[in-house]
Amino acid sequence: MTDRKTQLTSNLVKVEERIASACAAAGRKRTEVTLIVVTKTYPASDVRLLAELGVRHVAENRDQDAAPKAAACAGLPLDWHFVGQLQTNKVRSVASYADVVQSIDRAKLVSALSVAAVRAEREIGCLIQVALDAESGERGARGGVGPDGIGELAALVAESPGLRLDGLMTVAPLAGPYAGRQQAAFERLMGFSSRLRADHPAANMVSAGMSADLEEAVAAGATHVRVGTAVLGVRPRLG
Ligand SMILES: *Cc1c(COP(=O)(O)O)cnc(C)c1O
């Protein structure tokens, strides 16, 4: 094995152990939680190694980087998740490779993504990104719609051709009442998920937790964790 493959193998083993023990501690089955590896800033060669090591879900947050990487990895058995703030002028490109867009946070994005999905003859899974630090009617500093906007946006996704409503996503807020209280934040997200599932029973994905707080997310009930650093290493700072 190459050095990089050895390193990724050992990091994946550690992350797998963390997820497994968090599941055990929460009385959940390991199969209830899916690992998504966030490959942003890392090359397509790493994505290929991860696929060889059994990873089936990868995530990216910038279309400029993700589009060529996804093209270079076409044919690998991977689902591509888009997790970054998404401008409508990038939607057509993202719709060509993303299987799931986790950062749905406004109506204009839903309509643009629907048009692009239909044109690409693809069905795209959508998660509403919830900003737990946003006031009523606002969007969060790191993207996301305030909690009172979830219902309307979900209904819009559910009726949009080419789109499938899969559930909710959040990033633990750095400011506001939930700063530093990841588990409380993720439990609040679970509450919104229960409410969402009352109207949309199939929308049962809950994407929460990253390298630093995946245990809190699993404890709260997350179905998907998004892990970058703990698998690939510390990213060089962007910009
Ligand atoms: C980068 C990123 C992650 C992964 O963060 P790590 O701390 O590297 O695990 C998860 N979710 C989103 C939305 C991200 O942008």
Image (tube, rainbow, N blue to C red):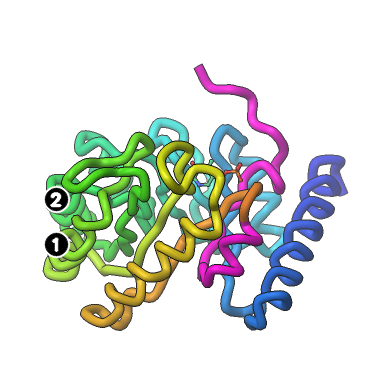
- Nearer to the camera, 149 or 185: 185
Cβ–Cβ below 8 Å for labels 1 and 2? yes
Q: Residue 162 carries which label?
A: none
Identified at 76% across, 70% down, the residue is 21
The x and y percentages for residue 196 are 28, 73
**Tag 1: Cα neighbours inside 10 Å, few (<14), some, or many (≥20)?**
few
Residue extent of the magenta highlight: 214-239
Q: Nearer the viewer, residue 207 or 48?
A: 207
- Asked if residue 45 shows in the view, the reply is yes
Q: Residue 107 carries which label?
A: 2
**Whether residue 1 is situated above or below residue 159 in the rendered picture:** above
Amino acid type, label 2: Ala
Q: Residue at x 68, y 64 (%)?
A: 54
Among numbered discs 1 and 2, the one appearing first in the sequence: 2
Query: Amino acid under label 1?
Result: Glu
Look at discs 1 and 2 and give the one toward the viewer: 1
Front residue of this view, candidates 76 and 32: 32
Residue 42: image quadrant is top right
Q: Is residue 162 visible?
A: no
Coordinates of residue 73 in the picture (x, y in percent):
54, 48
The Cα–Cα distance between marks 1 and 2, rounded to whole angstroms, is 9 Å
Mark 1 highlights which residue?
Answer: 152
Q: Is residue 53 magenta?
A: no
